Each structure stands twice: as C-alpha cells, then as structure tokens.
Amino acid sequence: MTDQAITNLVAELKTITAEETDPAAVIQRVKPLAAAMAEDTSWVRSEFYDADPDQGFGITILNEGPGHELLVEAICWLPGLGVAPHDHQTWAVVVGIDGEEVNVDWQRRDDGSKPGFADIEKARETRVSHGQVVSMLPDEIHSVYNDADKPSLSLHIYGVAPASLERSEFDPIAQVQRPCPQRKRKTAEG
C-alpha cells in the first residue's frame, strides 16, 4: 500500500521494534500510534469494507514485511458476526475506526498441559468504537463480534502475521483447543 499514513506508521513501527523486544513495552509505544490513525482516517478506502459473508469479516493487508513481520491490516466485521476465541502468538494492537465491535478477553482456567483441551471463561468485554485502542500479549485469548446493525472497521497491528504462526482457536463450550483456521485475506491495491 502506498498511502503515506501507512508508510509513516510502518516506519515508526520499525523504529520501535528495533529498540524494544519486550512485547508489553512495544505495545505501550504502539498504542498512541494506533490512536493517531483513528484521528485522521484519510487513509481509509471503501474497499476496506469488503467482507466475506461466509467468514463474517474481511481482512485487507496494508503492510506485511518479507519475513511476515509488522502486519498492519484493516478488518471489517459484518453485523451479527465475529470470530471464535483465539490467540495470536504475537503482540497485537487494535484501534476502532468506524462503528463498534465487542472485544472479549478470555481467561484460561486449566494449566494447558492436556493437548486439545482448554477450559476458558470470559474475563471482560470491551466495546471498541472510533479511537478506542485495545491490545493483546502473545498468549492472551480474545474473540471479537459485531453486535451492531452495520459493519464496523478496525485497524490491527501485529508484531508478526498471525497466519504465519502456530496459534490456537478455542471452543469454550466443548472445552477444545485446536489449530486456528487460516483466514481469507486480500492485499490493498496500491
């Protein structure tokens, strides 16, 4: 993507990740950058609202480094849909751009020692609207859904593209942990 705001964001992300290795420290420095992206949304394009009805959302890649580092993507969540609890195995910062979505943090009650099993419970819900920033450490579990009657759009920033990592999706009712499915993604036209 050639948009200057995204180019500037990626340059700042490169500086931060060259100076910081602790995910919590990186997140603290990235959060204000994410909030600034919500202040001036001139970089947002109508194509970012294209979503796959079968998937329940649409992902538009705005930046992904050659080694899958520093993934920046716009995600449009369709009304009434979302994604199951999952982890990222990398740090993540998300900012609301348009509409509202619900981010649910989950807490693991078991010790993770039994393969394929996970006992998780809801820890808290956060309504993410324009300018609100949420973040996740690599092992944190969260889910997202749009309970509004119109699509929502958010900007997601990751240390590494989650699709390139071995990560998990969770079923809290069946108490199952399984590999996270690959999501359909598209690249923004430059």
Image (tube, rainbow, N blue to C red):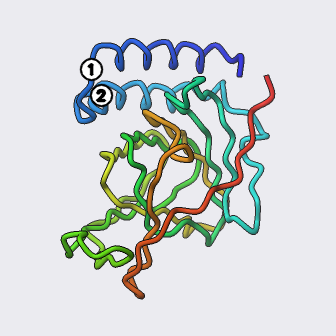
Tell me the distance, in whole angstroms, between the alpha carbons under discs 1 and 2: 6 Å
Q: Is residue 180 left or right of residue 117?
A: right
Q: Quadrant of the C terminus?
A: top right
Q: From the top left corner, tell me how far across and down residue 166 is, in percent.
A: 46, 52
Q: From the top left corner, tell me how far across and down residue 8 is, in percent.
A: 54, 13
How dense is the environment of label 1, judged by Cα within 10 Å: few (below 14), some, or many (20 and up)?
some
Q: From the top left corner, tell me how far across and down residue 55 is, in percent.
A: 69, 64
Residue shown at 69% from the left, 41% from the top: 60
CB within 8 Å, label 1 to label 2 = yes
Secondary structure at numbered mark 2? helix
Nearest the viewer among 68 and 51 is 68
Residue shown at 65% from the left, 67% from the top: 79
Residue shown at 31% from the left, 53% from the top: 139
Amino acid under label 2? Val
Question: Picture quarter containing residue 35?
Answer: top left
How dense is the environment of label 2, judged by Cα within 10 Å: few (below 14), some, or many (20 and up)?
many
Amino acid under label 1? Glu
Question: Picture quarter containing residue 121?
Answer: bottom left
Query: Disc number at residue 33?
Result: none
- Mark 1 highlights which residue? 20
Q: In the image, is residue 37 above or below residue 79? A: above
Residue shown at 67% from the left, 58% from the top: 57
Q: Is residue 37 left or right of residue 108?
A: right
Q: Is residue 137 left or right of residue 7?
A: left
Question: Picture quarter containing residue 44?
Answer: top right
Nearest the viewer among 8 and 97 is 8
Q: Mark 1 or mark 2: which comes first in sequence? A: 1
- Mark 2 highlights which residue? 26
Secondary structure at numbered mark 1? loop
Q: Quadrant of the N terminus?
A: top right
